[in-house]
Image (cartoon, helix red, strand yellow):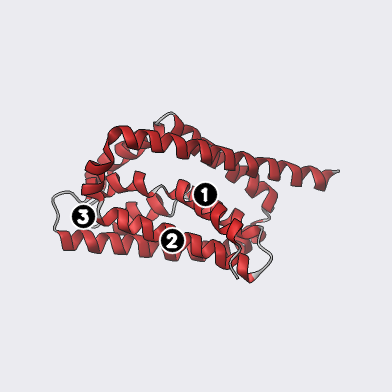
Amino acid sequence: MIDLALFISAFATLFVVIDPPGCAPIFATLTQGTTKSHQREMALKAVAVAAIVLIGFAYGGEWLFAKLGISLDALRLAGGVMLFIIGLNMVFEKRTETREERAEDLLEEIEDPEDISVFPMGIPMIAGPGTMATLLLLMSNTTTGGQEFSIMLALVIVLFITLVSFLIAGPLMKLMGKTFTNVLTRLLGVLLATLASQFIIDGVSGALVQFL
């Protein structure tokens, strides 16, 4: 049974963190001048690699953190801070500039500039630290299989949207326009900063309860 409230929350959070509209221009830049079939192959492979990494981390990340002696409250606090910084950068348009600069650098650094599916698109553009932390935070609060399914469904849908945005990256950039993209980025940044603040509050509250 799908937990609708959790699904909506997970979808909104993952959409903002992965940021398909923001990744699409980077994909278009890194695959410019290649054939349509190659672009499709890179898009499918990048999303598939990210999906494997994220799903594996969603179910195995908590075990790994337990082995390292890291509490979920510490993760909530650290993850919340990371997400807040991302949101802040989005509001002040720093994230887009950073990604564009990273794309230009990678075009020079990658030995085979045509194969960008695993790195940098799969990791870290899609399956980055922020996405991994977000998934682990969401999964740590689940108590039923239905809740886990709701989060995984949200992840799959966001990844599918990411795939579609990659496939239509060129026309999408022309359609959205710079003004619309800037407005959307800032709105998503505010939403992400708000959600990150809640993660921080939950982490601090949980830590205080343990000490008191």
Label 3: which residue?
A: 112
Counting residues from the N terminus, which is met first, the one under dot 2 or under dot 1?
1
Q: Check the image and name the residue furthest to the right.
A: 212
Quadrant location of the N terminus in the rendered image: bottom right
Q: Relative to 63, is 166 above or below?
A: above
Q: Secondary structure at mark 3?
A: loop
Residue at 61% in and 63% down: 3
- Any mark on residue 2, and which? none
Q: Secondary structure at mark 1?
A: helix
- Residue type at tag 3: Asp
Label 1: which residue?
A: 13
- Residue type at tag 1: Thr
| 10 Å crowding of disc 3: few (<14), some (14-19), many (20+) | few
Q: Secondary structure at mark 2?
A: helix
Pick whichever, 57 or 153, lies toward us.
153
Residue at 61% in and 60% down: 139
Q: How far apart are the alpha carbons under marks 2 and 1?
A: 12 Å
Residue at 49% in and 52% down: 14
Counting residues from the N terminus, which is met first, the one under dot 2 or under dot 3?
3
Q: Relative to 145, is 77 above or below?
A: above
- Any mark on residue 157, and which? 2
Q: Is mark 3 in CB contact (under 8 Å) with mark 1? A: no
